[in-house]
Image (cartoon, rainbow, N blue to C red):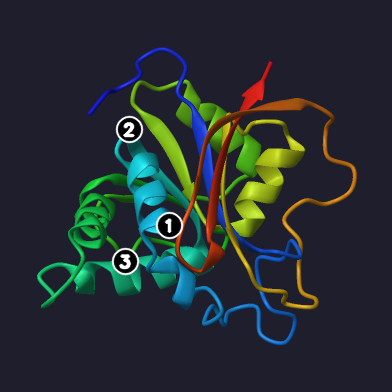
Amino acid sequence: MTKQTAGRRVVTNMSLSLDGRYAAPDNPLDMSWVMPYAHTDVARNLLTSLWEPATTALLGRVNAEGFLGFWPTVIGMDGVDPRDEAFAKWLVETDKVVLSSTLGEAPWERTTIADGPTPDVVADLKSTEGGDILVLSSASVIKALLAADQVDRLALTIFPIFLGGGPRLFDDGLPTGRWALADQSAGEHGTLALVYDRVR
């Protein structure tokens, strides 16, 4: 595992429908539309490539509750895909920062609660040594970082489904800028993984 000690990257990961939504319109917390595609080799390999160089996981409170409620249960599960188990172990063992104004203390190990503007929290993290700072599917966090032009690597998994409505990841008014395609792969069910690096 490579640790970057100069200039930590902020890496964001998000699943999107083909019509650009990250959640369904009727129930934003229902991610059942993701499940047929999340178990593909393309999605698993992308996630592996993102967490391996990362030493910090950054999540919003809602996603933290979902991720940290589910993933630790995967460890040791019968028939689990080795990539899923490896990610689960990394998530448990890595340093985690959860952005929340409502949590007083963290119910999870190796977790710090940060109550402040997302760009400020990330600027503080970037000033420390370590590997990538990986933002795991937390739309509100990713939106704030895109608006502040603090995303260095943008990873998207595109699933071939129209949700017909719901929130979009890319809001109007984002800072203009160019991105370079760093990696691409396609696989089962038409799943497409794209990784872009910010050109500065």
Q: Is residue 107 left or right of residue 137?
A: left
Percent coordinates x, y for residue 124 in the rendering: 51, 28
Can you identify the residue that label 3 sits on?
107
Per the image, the residue denoted by label 2 is: 53
Mark before the other along the chain sequence, 2 or 1: 1
Query: Where's the N terminus, which quadrant?
Result: top left
- Callout 3: SS: loop
Where disc 2 sits, the SS reads loop
Q: Amino acid at mark 1?
A: Ala
Q: Are marks 1 and 3 in contact (CB under 8 Å)?
A: no
Q: Name the image quarter holding residue 118.
A: top right
**Between residues 181 and 141, which one lies in front from this camera angle?**
181
Task: Name which residue lies at 83% across and 52% down.
Answer: 171
Residue 54 is situated, as x and y percent measured from the top left of the image, at 35, 36
Position above or below: 188 against 200: below
Q: Could you tell me which quadrant the C terminus lies in?
A: top right
Q: Earlier in the sequence, mark 1 or mark 3?
A: 1
Q: Which residue, given by chain and number where applicable, does mark 1 sit on?
A: 43
Mark 2 and mark 1 residues within 8 Å of each other at the beta carbon? no
Calculate the distance from the C-alpha at mark 1 to the C-alpha at mark 3. Answer: 28 Å
Q: Is 42 displayed left or right of 138 in the figure?
A: left
Residue 13 can be seen, yes or no? yes
Instruction: Place residue 166 in its image quadrant.
Output: bottom right
Residue in the image at 72% along x and 74% along y: 162
